[in-house]
C-alpha cells in the first residue's frame, strides 16, 4: 500500500491532472483506513508569516504535534503571493493527494473573483470550518452615538461615512448587507490598512469603521472607541455589552471562514482521518486559548456544512460586488 | 522624573545576560537582512517570528526590534558600495553615498553612515522616552486629508531630485505615477492593468523597481563602460591606511545635518504610514536646500549621505510611538511586531504601556543598548565590507545579480517581481544613458498611490468639497509648515550661498594644509 501511494504521488507530479484523479480514486478505494497517514504532510500557508492565516496554521500544527495526532512529520511552508493565489494554486495542482492541506481565509473566495485563478473555493475538499473572523461596527469614544439604534436613526437622516479595509473584502460586504437589512445608507471609505483606518476614526475624519475585535480591543478598553454591533454569533466579552446583528434581526450570514481544506479529489481515507483529528483538536485547551486570545468566534462545521457555508459566503460576496461594479 | 524611573526599570529588565544575547543576535540578523538587497526588515522579522514561539516575550521583542532597526544600518552598505539599496529606506543613501565610494572615500562614507545611523537611532529613542505620550497625539490627528497634504509635501522633494534636465525629470516622475496606478483600485475594487494576474492585484511594489533601476541599472552601465575588462579595484580607488577614517571637514560639515536629519526623521516616522523611506527622501532634499554647496549634491557630498541615514534610523524609532501608545503600526515592519504582540497574548492599545510597563520600557531601554551594539558592529565590519570593491568587477557583478534576484524573489516568492526587477534594470540603464531621473521615478511610484488614495478618501468624506483641508487642525498645521518652508528655505539658501562663497576660499586653504 505504501508503494501505491508513493506511486500516486510521483505520478501526479509527472503526469496531468486527469490521470492523477483517476489514480487517486483507485488508490482511495483500495487503501485501508489505517494506511493514512503514511507520509509527511505538506501544509501550505498561502500567506506570509505573522498574519492571521499563518498564526492559525502554526497553532494547529503545534497542537497536532503536541498530542501526536498525525504520526508523521509535518512540513509547514509559507507559499505567499497574489492574495493567496500562489499557495492555493499550489495545493490545487496537487489534486488527488491526501497529503496537501491548507488553511482558508476570506481570500479563498475573493481572489478568484478578482483574478483569473485556475481554481475556485468549491474545487477543494472541505474538511472543517473551525472559526470565523467577525466584525464590529465601531465609533469614536467621544461620538454622540452610544447604541446601534441611535446610529441607524441618525444615518437615516444623513448617511454617515464608514471606513473599512479594501472593497473586495468582508469589511465592505458585511456593512453593506447589514445596512440593506436595517434600512439605512452610508458612504464607504476604503483604506489600505487597519492602521490608517484607526487614525482616521480617532482624528474624526470618518464617522464609523468596521474592524476585527482582536485589532481594536485595546482601543475599546481605553475608551477611545465604542463598539455598536457585532456580526458574529456571540460578542466577545472584551468588547462590552454589545448586541449581535442576529439578535437584532439584521443578520448578514457572511464572515471570514477560518477552516481546513485538502487538495481537490483527496482520497476518502484522508478526509475521514482529518475529520476525526479536527474533533480532537477542538477539544484541547490550547485551541480554546487560541480562540480566546485572537477573539475569534468558534464555529465548527464539517464537510458538506462547511461547503454550504463557503457557498453562502461566496454568493453574498458576488451579489454585493456585482452591484458595486467591482467585478463583472 | 517618572520617565527616568521607568527607563531605569526597563534597563534592569533588558540587561540580563540571556536578553543581551538575543539583542546581539537580533542586531546581527538585522545587519545581514539589511545588506541583502530586496530583503527588507519586514521580511526578516516575519521569517524569524515563528522562532519566538515559546520564548520569553521581553527577550523576543528585544531581538525582533533589533532586527528592525539593525536593518537600517546594514541597508546603506550596499547603497554606498554598489549603488544598490539594501532596502527601501536607503534609496536616498545611494545619491551621494555611491559617488563618495567612486571618489575613493568608501571608508569615510561607511564610518559616517554608521555614526549617522547611531545618532538618528539614539536621538529617536531619547525622543520616545521623553515625548511618547505627547507624540501619540500627532498620530491621532492624522486622517486622509493630512496624508494627502503630506504626500504633496513629499512631492516637493521631486523638485530637488529632478536635477538639471527638468523635462526628462518630470517625465521620469510621471512614469512612476503611471506604474503606481497598477493594482486593485482601492475605492471601487476594480482591477487596473492587472491583466488577470493575481500577482499584480496588490500593485507594483517599489522594492524590485528600486533594485532594478539603481542596482542593475548601475551594473549594466558599468558593463557598457567596459569596467569588466579592467582588473581589480577599478570601481573605486581605496587606500586603507590613508582613507579609512573621515577627516575633520566631514565632521564639521555634518554636525548640524545629523541633528536636522534625526529630528525630521523622527517626526515623519511618528506619522503612521509615512515611514522611513519618505523620511529619508525628505531629509535629503531639505539638506540640499540648507546646504552651502547644493551643486555638489549627487556628486559625493557627505551631508547628502548623513541626512537620509540619520533620518531613516530616527524614523524607525519614531514608528514605535504609534505602535506602543495606540497599538497602531506605522509600517510593514511594525505591523509584524504588532502581530508578535498579539501572538504573545498582549493587547496593544492606549493602555499598553501602563499595563505592560516592564515589557514596554524593557524594549525602549534595549534600543539604547542595541544602537550602541550596532555602531560597534558596523565599525568593526567596515574593513571587511570595503573589501567588496576590491573584487574584480567581472566576478563581483554576477554575484550582485544573483543576490538581487534571490532577494527580490524571496520577499513574496513572485516571479513577476523578478521580471519587473530585470525590466527596471534595463530601463534604469537607458535612463542613466539619456539623463532621466530614476530617483524621481521611484518617488512617483511611492507617493503617487498614497496621494491618490488619500485624496479620494478625503473627497468621499467631504462629499467633494476641498474646504475640508481648512477645517481640520492637522491639515492647517501642515499647510502652514509647507508655506513657511517654501518661503524660508529659498531665502536661507540664498543667504547660505553668499556665506558659502565667502567661506569657500578659507575651506580650500584648510584642505590644502590638512592633506
Image: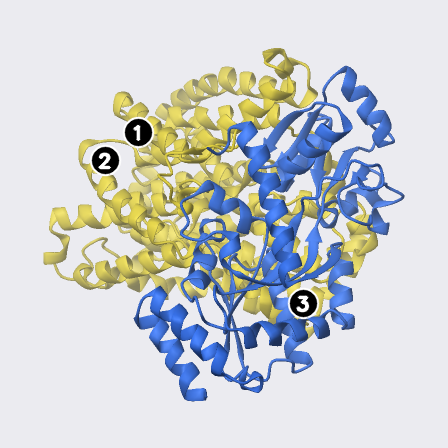
For label 2, count other residues whose C-alpha is less than 10 Å away and answer few (under 14), some (14-19) or many (20+).
some
Q: Colour of chain B?
A: yellow
Mark-to-mark CA distance, 1 and 2: 9 Å
**Mark 3 = which residue?**
B59
The answer to which of A17 and B310 lies nearer the viewer is A17
Q: Residue at x 43, y 31 (%)?
A: B285
Tell me whether circle 3 and circle 1 mark residues in contact (CB < 8 Å): no
In this rendering, the label closer to the viewer, 3 or 1: 1
Tell me which corner region of the image, top left, top right, bottom left or bottom right, holds residue A249: top right
Mark-to-mark CA distance, 3 and 1: 46 Å
> In the image, are marks 1 and 2 on the same chain?
yes
The answer to which of B443 and B295 lies nearer the viewer is B443
The answer to which of B432 and B337 lies nearer the viewer is B337
Chain ID for blue: A
First reached walking from the N terminus: tag 3 or tag 1: 3
Q: Which mark is residue B172?
A: 1
For label 1, count other residues whose C-alpha is less than 10 Å away and answer few (under 14), some (14-19) or many (20+).
many
Tell me whether circle 1 and circle 2 mark residues in contact (CB < 8 Å): yes
Q: Residue at x 29, y 49 (%)?
A: B419
Q: Chain of mark 3?
A: B
Instruction: Say left or right for B398 vs A185.
Output: left
> In the image, are marks 2 and 3 on the same chain?
yes
Give the percent coordinates (x, y) of residue B151: 51, 28
Give the secondary structure at mark 2.
helix
**Mark 2 = which residue?**
B431
Give the percent coordinates (x, y) of residue B394: 17, 61
Q: Is residue A269 visible?
A: yes
Give the percent coordinates (x, y) of residue A253: 71, 44
Tell me whether circle 2 and circle 3 mark residues in contact (CB < 8 Å): no
Q: Is residue B43 positioned above or below A6 on the image?
A: above
First reached walking from the N terminus: tag 2 or tag 3: 3
Amino acid at each position: 500500500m505504501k508503494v501505491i501511494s508513493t506511486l500516486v504521488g510521483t505520478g501526479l507530479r509527472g503526469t496531468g491532472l486527469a490521470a492523477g484523479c483517476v489514480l487517486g480514486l483507485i488508490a482511495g478505494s483500495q487503501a485501508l483506513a489505517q494506511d493514512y497517514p503514511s507520509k509527511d504532510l505538506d501544509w501550505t500557508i498561502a500567506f506570509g508569516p505573522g498574519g492571521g492565516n499563518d498564526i492559525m496554521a502554526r497553532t494547529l500544527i503545534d497542537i497536532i504535534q503536541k498530542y501526536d495526532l498525525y504520526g508523521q512529520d509535518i512540513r509547514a511552508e509559507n507559499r505567499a503571493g497574489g492574495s493567496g493565489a500562489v499557495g492555493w494554486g499550489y495545493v490545487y495542482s496537487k489534486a488527488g493527494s491526501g497529503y496537501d492541506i491548507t488553511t482558508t481565509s476570506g481570500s479563498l473566495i475573493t481572489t478568484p473573483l478578482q483574478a483569473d485563478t485556475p481554481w475556485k473555493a468549491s474545487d477543494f475538499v472541505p474538511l472543517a470550518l473551525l472559526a470565523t473572523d467577525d466584525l464590529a461596527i465601531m465609533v469614536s469614544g467621544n461620538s454622540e452615538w452610544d447604541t446601534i439604534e441611535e446610529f441607524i436613526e441618525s444615518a437615516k437622516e444623513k448617511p454617515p461615512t464608514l471606513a473599512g479595509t479594501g472593497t473586495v473584502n468582508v469589511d465592505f460586504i458585511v456593512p453593506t448587507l447589514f445596512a440593506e437589512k436595517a434600512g439605512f445608507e452610508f458612504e464607504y471609505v476604503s483604506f489600505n490598512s487597519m492602521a490608517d483606518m484607526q487614525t482616521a476614526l480617532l482624528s474624526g475624519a470618518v464617522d464609523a469603521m468596521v474592524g476585527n475585535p482582536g485589532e481594536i480591543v485595546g482601543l475599546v478598553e481605553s475608551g477611545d472607541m465604542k463598539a455598536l454591533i457585532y456580526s458574529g454569533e456571540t460578542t466577545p466579552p472584551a468588547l462590552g455589552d454589545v448586541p449581535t446583528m442576529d439578535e437584532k434581526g439584521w443578520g448578514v450570514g457572511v464572515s471570514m471562514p477560518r477552516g481546513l481544506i485538502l487538495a481537490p479529489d483527496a482520497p476518502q481515507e484522508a478526509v475521514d482521518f482529518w475529520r476525526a483529528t479536527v474533533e480532537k483538536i477542538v477539544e484541547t485547551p490550547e485551541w480554546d486559548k487560541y480562540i480566546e486570545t485572537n477573539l475569534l468566534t468558534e464555529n465548527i462545521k464539517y464537510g458538506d456544512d462547511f461547503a454550504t457555508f463557503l457557498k453562502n459566503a461566496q454568493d453574498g460576496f458576488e451579489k454585493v460586488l456585482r452591484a458595486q461594479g467591482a467585478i463583472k | 522624573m517618572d520617565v527616568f524611573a521607568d527607563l531605569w526599570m526597563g534597563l534592569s529588565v533588558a540587561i540580563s545576560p540571556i536578553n543581551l544575547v538575543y539583542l546581539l543576535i537580533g542586531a546581527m540578523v538585522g545587519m545581514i537582512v539589511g545588506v541583502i538587497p530586496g530583503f527588507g526588515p519586514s521580511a526578516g522579522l516575519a521569517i524569524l517570528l515563528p522562532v519566538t514561539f515559546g520564548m520569553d516575550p521581553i527577550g523576543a521583542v528585544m531581538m525582533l526590534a533589533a532586527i528592525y532597526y539593525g536593518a537600517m544600518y546594514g541597508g546603506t552598505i550596499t547603497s554606498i558600495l554598489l549603488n544598490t539599496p539594501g532596502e527601501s529606506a536607503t534609496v536616498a543613501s545611494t545619491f551621494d553615498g555611491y559617488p563618495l565610494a567612486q571618489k575613493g572615500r568608501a571608508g569615510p562614507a561607511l564610518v559616517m553612515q554608521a555614526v549617522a545611523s547611531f545618532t538618528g537611532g539614539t536621538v529617536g529613542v531619547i525622543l520616545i522616552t521623553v515625548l511618547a505620550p505627547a507624540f501619540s497625539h500627532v498620530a491621532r490627528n492624522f486622517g486622509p486629508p493630512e496624508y494627502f497634504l503630506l504626500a504633496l509635501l513629499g512631492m516637493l522633494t521631486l523638485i530637488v531630485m529632478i536635477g538639471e534636465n527638468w523635462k526628462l525629470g518630470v517625465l521620469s516622475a510621471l512614469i512612476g505615477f503611471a506604474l503606481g496606478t497598477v493594482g486593485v483600485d482601492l475605492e471601487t475594487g476594480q482591477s487596473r492593468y492587472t491583466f488577470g494576474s493575481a500577482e499584480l492585484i496588490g500593485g507594483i511594489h517599489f522594492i524590485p523597481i528600486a533594485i532594478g533601476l539603481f542596482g542593475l541599472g548601475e551594473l549594466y552601465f558599468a558593463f557598457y563602460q567596459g569596467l569588466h575588462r579592467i582588473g581589480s579595484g577599478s570601481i573605486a580607488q581605496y587606500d586603507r591606511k590613508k582613507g579609512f577614517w573621515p577627516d575633520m571637514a566631514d565632521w564639521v560639515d555634518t554636525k548640524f545635518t545629523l541633528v536636522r536629519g534625526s529630528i525630521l526623521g523622527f517626526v515623519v516616522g511618528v506619522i503612521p504610514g509615512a515611514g522611513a523611506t519618505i523620511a529619508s527622501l525628505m531629509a535629503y532634499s531639505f539638506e540640499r536646500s540648507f546646504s552651502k554647496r547644493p551643486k555638489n549634491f549627487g556628486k559625493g557630498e557627505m551631508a547628502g549621505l548623513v541626512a537620509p541615514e540619520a533620518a531613516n534610523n530616527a524614523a524607525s524609532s519614531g514608528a514605535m510611538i504609534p505602535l506602543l501608545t495606540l497599538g497602531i503600526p506605522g509600517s510593514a515592519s511594525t505591523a509584524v511586531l504588532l502581530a508578535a504582540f498579539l501572538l504573545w497574548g498582549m493587547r496593544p492599545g492606549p493602555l499598553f504601556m501602563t499595563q505592560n510597563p516592564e515589557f514596554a520600557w524593557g524594549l525602549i531601554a534595549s534600543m539604547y543598548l542595541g544602537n550602541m551594539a550596532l555602531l560597534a558592529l558596523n565599525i568593526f565590519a567596515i574593513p571587511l565590507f570595503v573589501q567588496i570593491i576590491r573584487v574584480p568587477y567581472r566576478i563581483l557583478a554576477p554575484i550582485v545579480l544573483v543576490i538581487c534576484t534571490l532577494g527580490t524573489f524571496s520577499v513574496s516568492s513572485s516571479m513577476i517581481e523578478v521580471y519587473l526587477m530585470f525590466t527596471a534594470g534595463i530601463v534604469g540603464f537607458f535612463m542613466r544613458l539619456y539623463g532621466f531621473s530614476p530617483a524621481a521615478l521611484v518617488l512617483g511610484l511611492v507617493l503617487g498611490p498614497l496621494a491618490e488614495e488619500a485624496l479620494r478618501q478625503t473627497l468621499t468624506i467631504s462629499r467633494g468639497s476641498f474646504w475640508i483641508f481648512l477645517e481640520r487642525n492637522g491639515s492647517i498645521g501642515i499647510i502652514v509648515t509647507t508655506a513657511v518652508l517654501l518661503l524660508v528655505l529659498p531665502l536661507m539658501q540664498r543667504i547660505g550661498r553668499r556665506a558659502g562663497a565667502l567661506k569657500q576660499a578659507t575651506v580650500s586653504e584648510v584642505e590644502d594644509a590638512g592633506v
